[in-house]
Each structure stands twice: as structure tokens, then as C-alpha cells.
Amino acid sequence: MTPDELEAALRAIGAERYHSNHPFHKRMYGGQLTRGQIEAWALNRYYYQCNIPAKDATLIARLPTSDLRRAWRSRLVDHDGDGQQPGGIARWLKLTDSLGLDRDYVISTKGILPATRFAVEAYITFVRDQSILDAIASSLTEMFSPTIIAERVEGMLANYDFVSSDTLAYFTPRLTQAPNDAKFALNYCKEHARTREQQEGVLAALRFKCNVLWVQMDALWGAYVDGHIPPGAFVPSVP
Ligand SMILES: O=C(O)c1cc(C(=O)O)c2c(n1)C(=O)C(=O)c1cc(C(=O)O)[nH]c1-2
């Protein structure tokens, strides 16, 4: 494959497998979720958010050059803040605050679904154990996140009176951060995935990561749409 053919193959995977295709997302932006279901989504998604810096620090520890480490470390600042400006984790907690979730409970992660925990842990393990090329490729879902974020924010503002643009402020910086991050990772993969085997590895890494996101939606659906809430997991106080 040429580098451009590789990019086209990556985009085809996103078109088919990104979590924007999941029925839970469609219900969310379509205004068909209850407040309790949105609370469950925000609570569970906190676990993804708060582990993204651990994932990125794991990768940085493996990167062989200053140039690569410097390029990647902006992601840590994006999520952890710089001590002056809040980062993504703090902004996510504003979202859970505004939904009325107890901050200590959210941070404790006691109420998240087992599948959320397993999926996020699998992502960190993948980045620790697979090749650096595959680890970088696993971040490429971010190529598709601006579209899902725009859809989600627009749909939620239009459909839920308990959500405001302030509630969803987490997403605003992501609309510029994600494309920058994705561009760097995509260029890296196009440049370094030369053999067929390497290219297949990159494609498999993106499929893996789509699964990490997809199973989190499946778990929310099973627990909060079908009603099979696992023992110990969050039970919404409102329907
Ligand atoms: O809102 C979303 O649907 C969405 C998706 C993704 C993604 O595609 O992995 C990320 C984010 N948001 C996000 O906010 C974020 O910080 C992020 C980091 C990463 C990553 O893999 O390093 N993905 C994502």
C-alpha cells in the first residue's frame, strides 16, 4: 500500500467501526436518553478521561527521541492542565458536577461498569506492550472524534434542558486539540508503516481501539438501556 492507500484504509475502518455508529450515541444526540442514562455515560467516561494521561505517559516512556517525546507531551498538558489552566480531566469533572453527580464518587470510580474498566485497562496495556508504531496508531480514532463531538454537542444542547454549553465546555478545546494530535499520529504512521506487515499492524491497532470505544457503549446499553446493571455499579437516582 502507498501511504495514501493506508490512510484510505484507516478512514474506511473509522467509517465502519467508530463509536459514532453505536445506537447509544445515536440515542444521545437524538434526545432519546434519560437524564439517568446521560449521568451513567458521564460517570463511566470519566474513567477513560482520567486514564488518557496514564496511557500517554506510558507511551512517552517508550519513545526513543526528544523530538517524539516533546511532540507527545502536549497531550499530558491538555488533560492534566499546566497548573494555571485546567486540563481535560478538570473540565470533565465540571460536566459531572453539572449533572449533579458527587465529585468524590466520580473520582473514586467505584460506580463504573466492569466493562469500562476492562476496556480502558486494555488500551493502556496495548500501548505498553505492542510496538511503538502500533501504540501510536491506536490513538488514530481521534481522526474521527471532531465529527462525533460536533454531533453530540449539537444534539445534546438541542434536546436536554439540563445540559448547557457550559456543561459541555470539555469538548470545545478538543475540536482543535484532536485534529492536531491525529495529524501528527497519522503522519507518523504513514511514514513508518512501510512493510505490509507493519501496515496490517497499524490497521489492526485502529480496529482494536474502535473496539475499546465500542464496548464501552455496549456496556452502557446493557446496563442502562436494557436494565442489566451489574452489582455495585451506579444506579441513577432519576430515571
Ligand atoms: O468524545 C469522543 O467521542 C472522544 C473520542 C476519543 C477517541 O476517539 O479515542 C477521544 C476523546 N473523545 C477525547 O476527548 C480524548 O481526549 C481522547 C484521547 C484519545 C486517545 O486515544 O489518546 N482519544 C480521545
Image (cartoon, grey):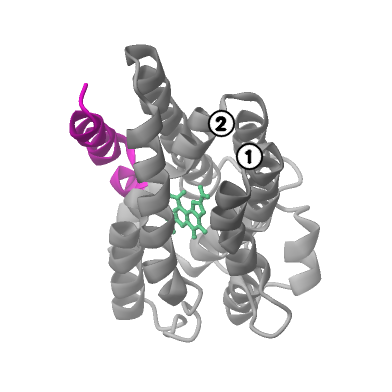
> CB of mark 2 within 8 Å of CB of mark 1?
yes
The secondary structure type at the circle numbered 1 is: loop
- 103 or 221: nearer the eye? 103
Residue for point 56% across, 51% down? 67
Numbered label attached to residue 63: 1
The secondary structure type at the circle numbered 2 is: helix
- What is the magenta range? 1-23
Q: Quadrant of residue 193?
A: top left
Task: Determine whether, in the image, residue 61 is placed left or right of residue 126.
Answer: right
Q: Quadrant of residue 176?
A: bottom left
From the top left corner, tell me how far across and down residue 134 is, in percent: 49, 29
Residue for point 34% across, 50% down? 143
Residue for point 67% across, 57% down? 50
- 14 or 143: nearer the eye? 143
Q: Where does label 2 land, which residue?
A: 132
Most common secondary structure along the magenta stretch? helix
Which residue is outermost to the front? 66
Amino acid on which the number 1 mark rests in the picture: Leu
Task: Determine whether, in the image, residue 144 is placed left or right of residue 177.
Answer: left
Height in image: 98 above or below 50? Answer: below
Height in image: 130 above or below 105? Answer: above
Amino acid on which the number 2 mark rests in the picture: Ile
Q: Earlier in the sequence, mark 2 or mark 1?
A: 1
- Say which quadrant the N terminus sits in: top left
Height in image: 86 above or below 67? Answer: below
From the top left corner, tell me how far across and down residue 234 is, in percent: 68, 55
- 82 or 95: nearer the eye? 82
